[in-house]
Image (cartoon, rainbow, N blue to C red):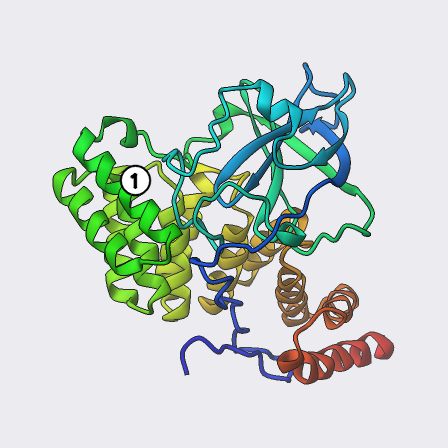
Amino acid sequence: MKGMFFFAVSLAWAQTPDVGVKPGPNPYTIPSSQARGALISGRFVMEDGSAPPALVRVELTCNSIARPQGWSDEQGYFSVRMEVNNPDEIMDLTYATTPQRPNSGALSTSEPPPIDTIPRNLEGCDVRGALGGYRSSVIPLSGHRRLDSPDIGTIVLYPVEKVQGFTTSATTDLAPAAAKKAHEKALEDLKKNKPDEAEKELKKAVQMYPRYALAWFDLGRIYESRDRTKEAAEAYRHSTEADDKYLPPYERLYILAAREENWALTRELAEKVIHLDPVDFPRAYYFDAIADLNLGDVDAAEKSAREAVRMDLHANPRAGYVLGVILARKQEFAEASALLDAYLKVAPAIEKDAVERQAAEARKHVAQK
């Protein structure tokens, strides 16, 4: 059955795991309340571990809305309290927080449409740094609770020249006024939980301006959320054709390809994203690893899985499981056992029995050495 790819219990493990493409929060859900005043702290560093060349702004993104939340010190350390109407946000008019601002997809990955709020428990939120000339790694905050340690770790800044792709589309500013108006109307319809009306408006927008990559992407997300996957994939492809540097539709396409077990296409699309932006899409490494494993390229799978673990293990613990299975296939049982045992602590109930058997077999091989 497509979509369910569990490893066999044997350490031959020729099968592939469930790739973890499970539906996230309903993309039309509007959070009912806000999580005000959550404190977070951490540090910005350059690739070599040194301090940034200037103060770095702390940027919180929830529901596709970026909010400035304060600044680091000269060494890159920061400690900020995240809240709506943060003084830093009020003083900087370059951050427009109105829902109509079309600077990113209305239905970005696993997040609700843009609304002027910070969700409860920071679900769908992430933190990054903003510094001219640099791109920032991202730390997801979903699952971070108020009583958790405020320290979210280290955020790395990379020179812009390493990133060729973008999470916004250059074609948006070129759209005619009527197309933009239709797109804005679609966003309003989504806020009111009217996907049928939103779909009609987005179709108008792309008919008036076929190179409207953002509108094509939002149309694809509506289709996908309603299980119209063929139409979704077509809309995402139109989005990439309209702007081949706009990355969100590539991400949705490789997820859809993985659901269909089209591993060659999954690898092609994931590696396209990695090539254009090796920083901001850690899940591309995860899907690339799974595709490589299914295609029999175990060494390439290990390389991508290690990157997924390095960049995204906290947000995606399944990356550690996939790496553990890859290493077990390579008979590197000690590290595999540690990774599988770690995943057991957070594995969903449906997987625990199978993962426990795999972990036990790996431990047995370690004990025999």
Please tell me which residue lies in front, 219 or 81. Answer: 81
Is residue 187 toward the left or the right of residue 127 in the image? Answer: left
The answer to which image quadrant residue 225 occupies is bottom left
Is residue 101 toward the left or the right of residue 86 in the image? Answer: left
Q: Residue 343 at x, y = what percent?
A: 72, 68
Please tell me which residue lies in front, 18 or 186. Answer: 186
Is residue 168 toward the left or the right of residue 239 in the image? Answer: right
Please tell me which residue lies in front, 140 or 345. Answer: 140
The residue at the far left in this view is 208
Q: In the image, what residue occupies the spot 43% across and 51% down? A: 270
Q: Is residue 55 above or below residue 311?
A: above
Q: Amino acid at mark 1?
A: Glu
Q: In the image, what residue occupies the spot 48% across and 78% down? A: 4
Residue on which the image places disc 1:
184
Q: Is residue 214 above or below residue 218?
A: above
Q: Residue 81 at x, y = what percent?
A: 73, 35
Q: Residue 100 at x, y = what percent?
A: 37, 36
Residue 37 is at least partly visible in this image:
yes
Q: In the image, what residue occupies the spot 76% across and 63% down? A: 335
The answer to which image quadrant residue 286 occupies is bottom right
Q: In the image, what residue occupies the spot 83% across and 47% down? A: 149
**Within 10 Å of the Cα at label 1, are there few (<14), some (14-19), or many (20+) other Cα atoms?**
many
Please tell me which residue lies in front, 8 or 31. Answer: 31
Q: Residue 287 at x, y = what percent?
A: 49, 58
Residue 11 is at least partly visible in this image:
no
The quarter of the picture where the C terminus appears is bottom right
